[in-house]
Image: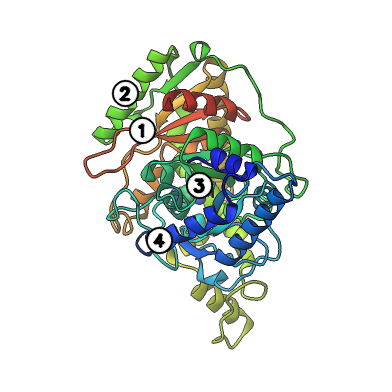
């Protein structure tokens, strides 16, 4: 059953929210011993919420559009009175004083928050191996990583331990794990979902989005979590562009850049199959060029690391989380608290970011990267005057094995080559799973990118392809 039908059955009283939640809690107990998608299961508060929903139904009071739907959240979003760690030792004992707007909106629609999911520490990574606590396995093949940084959220939906999950995507952290785990993953337009209550990594890129098992649930989840929020100064007042969708009038662009070469053979095969399917549906396919996206990866790593080094300055041991007991002076207190609290990838980003923001290097690195970001944005702007949607694979390879890329951070960074350009441009993009799997049982994801506030056309095209 999908989220929509569960919510309808709960609303009509045909099934009880408590039964659904107990079912999911049992399934988590059974499956998550192996998968490790969750850092914590909120059994008590989930059951309490489910009882409230059942009571409302019994009293014929109105209930929300997600009534009784079990939703998992990435461990970098606040949920009042619940722990949030960003999978980091530095926040190991942090309890949320309030809820993120996206979480609040889910609760208002009577979703049930079932637990918080594993991730790369502070959302930095592509395999969830940078979590300070545990490794999450890919439910399709447990020898392989689930992708990252929202690997736990992707795995939770893929293993049906939640119907919907929230993730955050800064450079691909929803789309890449969605592709690896064989589920749908949406990175909305920057500014369409409030970042209030999301622990900041790179503020100009971070965006909350969702994982689901089908396009209809994605549309519903997005409609619930999106919308203007006064509490987030980068939240947009612009609304969705609701255009009538006719596949025969849709023009799909295929970038002709060199990075489209070098795909894993199975990904190339599925990519060509998707093009064929779209043609059969009546869409027109056009060659396009996004010339500056060849610089997207280094541009992203300068901007994201710079913003991260500034955002993570707040974890100094005096305000949040871990504070070192070994320090004998103030400066040592800062050094030891951060040294003990952060893992190696986070430290690497802080060092890179601090360097590129420092006097003397700022113009050469950060400012230069910002200029290239504008050129990349303009590439997309120009492309969207000619076409409606851009199609690429989500990733150049399928899910890799544990440890394969851990020793070489650059090769890990390369797994986001297709997802980062849309993040820099702030446009919306979604990863959809292809039907055919590899011999190892792994999934291939296709990425559909559209212009700002044009998510609805993405949902429409996914709907047609999944039929
Ligand atoms: N893998 C990319 C990184 O490590 C993207 C992370 C993300 O989107 N949060 O920065």
Question: Local crowd at mark 2 within 10 Å, few (<14), some, or many (≥20)?
Answer: few
Q: CA distance from mark 2 to mark 3?
A: 28 Å
* Residue picked out by circle 4: 32
Any part of residue 205 in sight? no
From the top left corner, tell me how far across and down residue 161 is, in percent. 45, 53
Q: Compare marks 2 and 3 and give the one earlier in the sequence.
A: 3
Q: Is residue 407 left or right of residue 421?
A: left
Q: Nearer the viewer, residue 424 or 163?
A: 163
Question: Local crowd at mark 4 within 10 Å, few (<14), some, or many (≥20)?
Answer: many
* Residue picked out by circle 1: 434
Q: Compare marks 4 and 1 and give the one earlier in the sequence.
A: 4
Q: CA distance from mark 3 to mark 1?
A: 19 Å
Residue at the (38%, 45%) spot, across then down: 181
From the top left corner, tell me how far across and down residue 374 is, in percent. 58, 33
2 and 1 marks in contact (CB < 8 Å): yes
Question: Local crowd at mark 3 within 10 Å, few (<14), some, or many (≥20)?
Answer: many
Q: Compare marks 2 and 4 and give the one earlier in the sequence.
A: 4
* Residue picked out by circle 3: 163
Tell which tag, 2 or 4, sits nearer the viewer. Answer: 4
* Residue picked out by circle 2: 273
Per the image, label 1 sits on a secondary structure element best described as loop
């Amino acid at each position: 059953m999908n989220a929509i039908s569960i919510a309808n059955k709960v609303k009509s009283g045909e099934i009880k929210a408590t039964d659904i939640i107990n079912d999911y809690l049992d399934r988590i107990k059974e499956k998550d011993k192996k998968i490790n998608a969750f850092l914590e299961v909120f059994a008590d508060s989930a059951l309490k919420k489910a009882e409230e929903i059942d009571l409302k139904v019994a009293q014929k009071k109105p209930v929300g559009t997600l009534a009784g739907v079990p939703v998992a959240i990435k461990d970098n979003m606040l949920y009042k009175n619940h722990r949030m760690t960003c999978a980091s030792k530095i926040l190991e004992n942090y309890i949320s004083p309030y809820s993120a707007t996206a979480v609040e909106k889910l609760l208002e629609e009577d979703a049930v928050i079932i637990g918080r999911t594993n991730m790369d520490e502070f959302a930095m990574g592509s395999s969830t191996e940078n979590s300070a606590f545990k490794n999450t396995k890919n439910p399709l093949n447990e020898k392989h990583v689930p992708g990252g940084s929202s690997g736990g959220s992707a795995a939770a939906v893929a293993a049906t331990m939640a119907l919907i999950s929230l993730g955050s995507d800064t450079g691909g952290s929803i789309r890449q794990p969605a592709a690896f785990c064989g589920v749908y993953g949406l990175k909305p337009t920057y500014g369409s979902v409030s970042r209030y209550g999301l622990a900041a990594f790179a503020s100009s890129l971070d965006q909350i989005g969702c994982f689901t098992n089908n396009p209809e649930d994605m549309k519903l989840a997005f409609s619930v979590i999106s919308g203007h929020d006064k509490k987030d100064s980068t939240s947009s007042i612009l609304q969705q562009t609701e255009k009538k969708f006719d596949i025969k009038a849709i023009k799909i662009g295929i970038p002709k850049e060199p990075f489209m070469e070098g795909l894993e053979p199975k990904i190339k095969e599925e990519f060509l199959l998707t093009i064929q399917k779209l043609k059969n549906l009546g869409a027109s396919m056009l060659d396009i060029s996004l010339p500056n996206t060849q610089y997207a990866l280094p541009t992203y790593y300068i901007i994201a690391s710079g913003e991260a080094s500034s955002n993570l300055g707040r974890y100094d041991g005096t305000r949040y989380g871990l504070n070192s007991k070994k320090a004998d002076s103030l400066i040592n207190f800062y050094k030891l608290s951060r040294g003990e609290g952060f893992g190696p990838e986070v430290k690497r980003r802080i060092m890179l970011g601090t360097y590129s923001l420092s006097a003397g290097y700022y113009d050469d690195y950060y400012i230069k990267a910002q200029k290239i970001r504008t050129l990349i944005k303009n590439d997309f702007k120009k492309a969207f005057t000619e076409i409606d949607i851009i199609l690429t694979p989500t990733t150049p390879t399928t899910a890799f094995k544990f440890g394969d890329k851990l020793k070489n951070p650059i090769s890990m960074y390369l797994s986001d080559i297709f997802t980062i350009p849309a993040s820099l441009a702030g446009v919306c993009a979604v990863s959809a799973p292809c039907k055919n799997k590899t011999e190892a049982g792994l999934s291939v994801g296709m990425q559909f990118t559209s212009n700002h506030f044009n998510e609805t056309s993405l949902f429409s095209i996914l709907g047609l392809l999944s039929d």
